[in-house]
Image (spheres, rainbow, N blue to C red):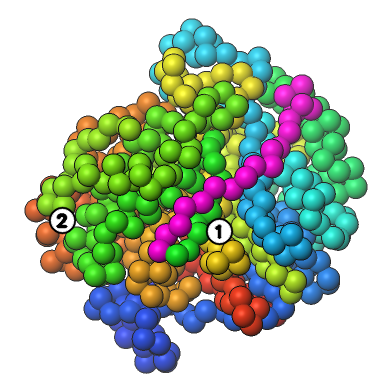
Amino acid sequence: MPNFTTKLCFVSAKKLVLSFLAITTLNAHSFDRITGETFASRSEVIAKNGMVATSQPLATQVGLDILKQGGNAIDAAIAANAMLGLVEPTGNGIGGDLFAIVWDAKTKRLYGLNASGRSPKSLSLDYFKQQGMSKIPSHGPLPVSVPGAVDGWFELHGKFGSMPMTSILSPSIEYAKSGFPVSELIAYYMNRSVPILSKFDGFKETYMPNGSAPKKGQMFANPNLAATYEKIATGGRDAFYKGDIARTIAAYMKEQGGFLSYEDLATHTSNWVEPVSSNYRGYDVWELPPNGQGIAALQILNVLEQYDIEGMGFGSAEYIHTFVEAKKLAFEDRAKYYADPEFNEIPVEWLISKSYAKQRSQLIDMNKAAKRFDAGLNEGDTIYLTTADKDGNMVSLIQSNYRGMGSGMTPTGLGFILQDRGEMFSLKEGHFNVFEPGKRPFHTIIPAFVTKDGKPWLSFGVMGGGTQPQMHAQIVINLIDFGMNLQEAGDAPRILHSGSSEPTDEVMIDGGYVSLENGYSEKTRRKLVQMGHILRDVSGSYGGYQAIMRDSKSGVYFGASESRKDGQASGY
């Protein structure tokens, strides 16, 4: 596997940086991963009339075309998401769930949508006990929960959309029929999924039409998905949840020994929720409340606000140590409390309060890494996209099948895979996140938004399982504490701590381990080891970033896209 930590690492990073510098004039904040000076993979994209940033260029262009045709940011987000379900099935699709934060320019406020699905009503905790299971499997029929994405599209469209859904889904339908050339990273992950998922009925027919998954640059079509999209475009959300599509899904799942039923699909609903926020050095950072993990980012930032992060300096062992310890603290609460609020009384207001952060910060030893904390999943492939229009509407949207391409359950003739999000339930009785019928599992996917003085400033997200709240906090810190621009904030090398306690019953007893992207000095690494941190290199696990920033005075948009992905930000 190539090292997808960054595409700058495909060849000698030093040589590439030097060649890049030879042809590019960088501003004072760009971040050079080798020397520790600032360097960016490219300049920000700047436009006035609209902006779209996704993890795949064809999806970005579809979203942008919708804006140019008179659609708004919500229309563009749905169109781009539908296209991503076709061109990036390794991370998302209509077999998965969706979360979104929308800035509505008319009402001048944020709206949050939780479009995640629930567990099958006919499946119980006792079943897993009877099977002798201590953990829900990663693949197959058991981790499948109701896919919420399509209902999410229609909730967003019903509240804010302006174009008909037939027009919004038309580009994806045409691409699905005629085919598209598969991009590099997506081809890699599709081929990596073959040994795991090809044993399940329907996978080969959908994703291996010529006997193998497509390679980079190879044309790939999905006529079954085109037909499914056409039914949804003309028949609405009920075509998916109450029509032939639902009956096909239910029949397939029964054949596979699964529990997801027609009734589960027919009774599904999304929920509009109030985003929650915490102020970080004058900026209001917004996340969605559980069953997602967004408030972990707020908890991390609340702890770090008590330290002079700017004075510590980017790349310093002191900053990295403080960040990692704050993350460990937040993730202990994440492991204990984050779950479906319809089944638990979750103390969200207390968890994201400044007083709680001050109390928790007293547990941090500035000279030594903690091996464990008590409460007071880095796997997961996802897409994140953000859109903005000429009227000032902005959308922060994230969507996922969870682990890789999902469960492997590929319903006959529909062109997509069902998610395996149910794997994220605990099987421990009494746990907030324990499996129960009709319950939403703990979710890793989280959209984010930042306002300044009550005005929209930043719509952003970072893909990648349990990395997401860590990277949300780092993006905010890079922008606010270290003065980076939007592209630099995403390109800067990242810190990833793994091994924390999890909502699926794992408990941290050894302090976990820290992974640092290329660009941190050997001196910093040695000091972290001296402080008791275990360092371990990983590849491809640092997330994928997209962002749009708005200048409130001029209305100009700045866009940035992930250098670690195939993505693109584009405006007009």
Image position of 379 (left or right of 85): left
- For residue 329, which quarter of the picture? top left
Residue 211: mark: none
Q: Earlier in the sequence, mark 1 or mark 2?
A: 1
Calculate the distance from the C-alpha at mark 1 to the C-alpha at mark 2: 32 Å
Query: Which label is found at residue 449?
Result: 1
Q: Nearer the viewer, mark 1 or mark 2?
A: 1
For label 1, the SS is strand
Tell me residue 493's x, y (percent).
34, 66
Let me know if residue 187 appears in the view. Answer: no
Label 2, residues with CA under 10 Å away: few <14, some 14-19, many ≥20: many
Residue 284 percent location from the top left of the image: 50, 59
Q: Residue, x 60% and y 67% (percent of image)? A: 455
Q: Magenta segment range?
A: 263-281
Whether the magenta-drawn stretch holds residue 252 is answered as no
- Identify the amino acid type marked 2: Leu
Q: Height in image: 295 above or below 310?
A: above
Residue extending furthest toward the right: 234
Circle 2 sits on which residue? 528
Q: Position of residue 558 (x, y in %)?
A: 57, 76
Quadrant of res 526: bottom left
Residue at x 53%, y 37% (from the top left corner): 290
* Residue drawn at x 38%, y 80% as measured from the top left: 30
Residue 272 drawn in magenta: yes
Residue 103 lies, with reference to residue 434, above or below; the image says below
In the image: residue 326, left or right of residue 424: left
Residue 494 versus residue 244: which sits nearer the camera?
494
Q: Where is residue 324 drawn, in percent x and y?
A: 27, 51
Say which residue appears at 61% left-offset and 57% top-offset: 396
What crowding class fits label 1: few (fewer than 14 Cα within 10 Å), some (14-19), or many (20 or more)? many
